[in-house]
Image (cartoon, rainbow, N blue to C red):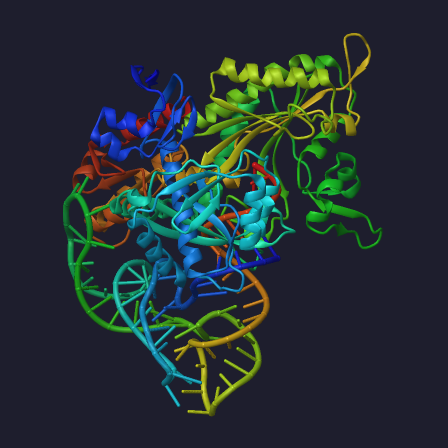
RNA sequence: GCCGUUGUAGCUCAGUGGUAGAGCGCUUCCUUGGUAAGGAAGAGGUCAUGAGUUCAACUCUCAUCAACGGCUCCA
């Protein structure tokens, strides 16, 4: 028998008979691995365990510990869930059923069946019944005609539609018991490893994501090789709920909503407004140092402004209705973006190349209509404040300007310990380039500049082709919230369109008129979303420089309230902020309440402290830092804030 | 906007076809205390809103509004 060379992930080389399967390889290594292996990657292609390897190859065995292993596991689970549902609801039709980040879903047309969470239990039971019976996944290559024939007969028009889009000769079915599905695979060998399953939610989902087509029922599920892992996962979800910014925002009295004010319109309460102001002031300071000028523009703008910018044509119909003046019938729009206003500022006087770059910054509140079902706490609202700025520069300056912006973004992320962000560079479609405005030369220059800057800065950015806006390439920053949803925060966008539309110019050294390039940028993205994500990130334990209260003073008894007041005044004179718990409660109680309120420093004052002019310091979390003078404590806070700000 | 779930005291939640309950919080009083809950009393609710069924609706039905989980869209 002919031998082939298999390179394993640890770099070791082993010889096997030609036609060896990943399962056999796993088995040759250890019984344990053979029991746990879910799928394999052969030369970077994920395959099933029965895949016959016919030439020298790199093989990685995938277990539950690998994302790709989990995905195969979940994808197979999706099939079993579909099988369970088909048995319980004969005649339903199936759309697609992929694995997702955590678990999987299947889009199903339930025909006349009504389905709700009361049905979950029986589907789960049926699922486990099938899984326990150790059903094998059998791969079958079929011709397009056969495939179409099968699903036409079954009456599943969704699968027929999918098959019609496929090339003949590449179509495979997977059979698991009596359920046959169109599927590229790969799959588990059999269902015996799927030990736990739960339907997590159901939702409507348009067929092929198209609002105009039929809405199917998307059934979300998650499965695990061990029952305990399911329990752990559910516990983790419970834990994550405690970090939810909507819950924390209410508890810490940072912001609120009122349906009487209007849905999706956040209201910042005093403590939240103060916190936001600290963030804004911090960024203003950085921007001042980086040569930005602060501007302020109105919350509405004449409809013609947005006709010039193009926003009206694109968003006019899907936005708040225009505001009209009673006498003249002029139309105004609530500002959906700040850029048109800033373009007007740029255009307000002649500019020389010596004036560039011109950096105009504004914490500009914008208003956008979002569908009611889309609103979500502070992360998706109808009125929000962008930490916006527009940089007008020459093509030569683009790269440095981009780099300058990126530095600000990264500094903010570093300071707030946002280590798990993802950066995405969005470039033009590689093939279809008709839809992009701006010269080929400028685009190339800008795209290259972004790539170079990312490299020089050492950030780990994913490049996505075809994701650029029609007006220019961009770089976005995404951060996950407590439940794992991704939100876009910062963005840096190059724009050739608006300078064109507003006919912006500068006089070059050649005494000719040139068109500047514009960069839109918002390091936070929006103050609302940023604070939401920050709140979830730190679970309400804000860094000291941001915390609404930096300390709370707990008098041991009301004999020491006067002393507490004198300390508070001293600290306020040094621009530290805090409060006093004057309730007639025992110290243990006051400490507990202060801990629950996430007070960074708890200062106990009683007889000892009063007679010595000191405070007893306890840090949030229970660390006793001993007794110190008030000046020492002020110094302690200042040093900590300084350290945080210099990260 | 669409699909599904939910809506009872400031918060977290019980509850029943015969016009409401707990814990926490709040108010008052007692207690004046040393590193995560001292004691007692009291106030507080058109049971989201509107219609319908019924002798009777917080409970059943429908509609509306809002919140929550998704879908299309986006900071």
Query: Residue placed farthest to the top in the image?
Result: A510
Task: Name the image quarter holding residue A418.
Answer: top left
Residue A417: image x %, image y %?
39, 29
Q: Residue at x 33, y 52 (%)?
A: A130
Q: Does residue A583 appear left or right of residue A455 in this picture?
A: left
Relative depth, front residue between A609 and A501: A501
- Which residue is most to the front? A1
In the rendered picture of this protein, how many numbered marks are placed on residues? 0
Residue placed most toward the observer, B74 or A535? B74
Q: Quadrant of the N terminus of chain A?
A: top left
Q: On the picture, is A129 further left or further right than A297?
A: left
Relative height, residue A457 to residue A551 (above, below): above
Residue drawn at 56 percent across, 55 percent down: A155
Percent position of residue A61, x then y? 33, 27
In-front residue for pair A467/B35:
A467
Please say whether residue A209 is visible from this viewpoint.
no
Against A25, residue B71 (above or below) is below
Q: Is residue A587 visible to us here?
A: yes
Q: Is residue A473 left or right of residue B28?
A: right
Q: In x, y percent, where is residue A498?
A: 73, 29
Left or right of A411 on screen, residue A615: left
- Quarter of the picture containing the C terminus of chain A is top left
Name the spot of residue A372 as percent of width and height, x first.
58, 54
Foreground residue among A66 and A408: A66
């Amino acid at each position: 028998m002919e031998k082939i060379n298999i390179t394993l992930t640890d770099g070791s080389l082993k010889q096997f008979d030609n036609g060896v399967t990943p399962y056999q390889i796993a088995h040759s290594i250890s019984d344990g691995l053979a029991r746990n292996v879910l799928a394999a990657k052969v030369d970077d292609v994920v395959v099933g365990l029965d895949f016959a390897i016919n030439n020298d190859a790199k093989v990685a065995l995938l277990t539950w510990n690998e994302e790709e292993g989990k995905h195969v596991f979940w994808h197979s689970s999706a099939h079993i869930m579909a099988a369970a549902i088909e048995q319980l609801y004969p005649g339903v039709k199936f759309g697609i059923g992929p694995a997702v980040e955590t678990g999987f879903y299947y889009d199903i047309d339930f025909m006349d069946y009504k389905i709700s969470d009361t049905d979950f239990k029986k589907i789960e039971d049926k699922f486990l019944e099938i899984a326990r019976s150790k059903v094998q996944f059998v791969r079958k290559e079929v011709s397009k005609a056969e495939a179409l024939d099968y699903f036409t007969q079954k009456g599943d028009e969704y699968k027929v539609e999918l098959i019609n889009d496929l090339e003949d000769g590449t179509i495979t079915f997977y059979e698991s018991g009596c359920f046959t599905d169109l599927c590229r695979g790969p799959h588990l060998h059999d269902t015996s490893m799927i030990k736990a399953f739960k339907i997590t939610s159901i939702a409507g989902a348009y067929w092929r994501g198209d609002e105009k087509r039929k809405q199917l029922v998307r059934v979300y599920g998650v499965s695990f090789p061990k029952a305990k892992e399911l329990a752990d996962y559910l516990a983790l979800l419970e834990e994550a709920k405690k970090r939810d910014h909507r819950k924390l925002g209410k508890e810490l009295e940072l912001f609120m909503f009122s349906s009487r004010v209007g849905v999706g319109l956040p209201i910042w309460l005093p403590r939240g407004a103060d916190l936001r102001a600290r963030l804004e002031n911090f960024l203003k300071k950085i921007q001042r140092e980086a040569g930005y000028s602060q501007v302020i523009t109105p919350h509405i703008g004449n409809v013609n402004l947005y006709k010039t910018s193009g926003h009206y044509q694109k968003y006019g119909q899907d936005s708040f209705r225009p505001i009209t003046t009673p006498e003249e019938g002029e139309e105004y729009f609530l500002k959906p973006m700040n850029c048109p206003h800033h373009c007007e500022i740029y255009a307000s006087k002649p500019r020389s190349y010596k004036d560039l770059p011109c950096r105009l910054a504004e914490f500009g509140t914008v208003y956008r209509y979002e569908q009611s079902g889309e609103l979500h706490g502070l992360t998706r609202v109808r009125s929000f404040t962008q930490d916006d700025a527009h940089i007008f520069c020459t093509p030569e300056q683009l790269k440095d300007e981009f780099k300058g912006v990126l530095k600000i973004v990264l500094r903010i992320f570093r300071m707030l310990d946002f280590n798990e962000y993802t950066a995405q560079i969005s470039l033009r479609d590689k093939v279809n380039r008709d839809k992009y405005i701006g010269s080929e030369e400028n685009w190339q220059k800008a795209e290259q500049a972004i790539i170079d800057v990312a490299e020089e800065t050492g950030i780990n950015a994913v490049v996505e082709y075809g994701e650029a806006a029609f007006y220019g390439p961009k770089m976005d920053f995404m951060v996950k919230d407590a439940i794992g949803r991704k939100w876009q925060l910062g963005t840096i966008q190059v724009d050739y369109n608006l300078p064109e539309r507003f006919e912006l110019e500068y006089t070059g050294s050649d005494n000719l008129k040139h068109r500047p390039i514009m960069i839109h940028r918002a390091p936070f993205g929006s103050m609302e979303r940023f604070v939401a994500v920050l709140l979830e990130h730190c679970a309400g334990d804000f860094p000291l420089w941001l915390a609404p209260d930096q300390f709370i003073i707990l008098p041991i008894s009301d004999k020491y309230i006067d002393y507490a007041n004198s300390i508070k005044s001293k600290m306020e004179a040094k621009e530290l902020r805090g409060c006093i718990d004057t309730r007639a409660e025992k110290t243990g109680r006051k400490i507990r309440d202060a801990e629950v309120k996430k007070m960074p420093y708890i200062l106990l004052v009683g007889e000892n402290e009063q007679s010595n002019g000191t405070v007893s310091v306890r840090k949030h979390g229970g660390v006793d830092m001993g007794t110190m003078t008030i000046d020492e404590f002020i110094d302690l806070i200042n040093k900590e804030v300084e350290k945080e700000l210099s990260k």
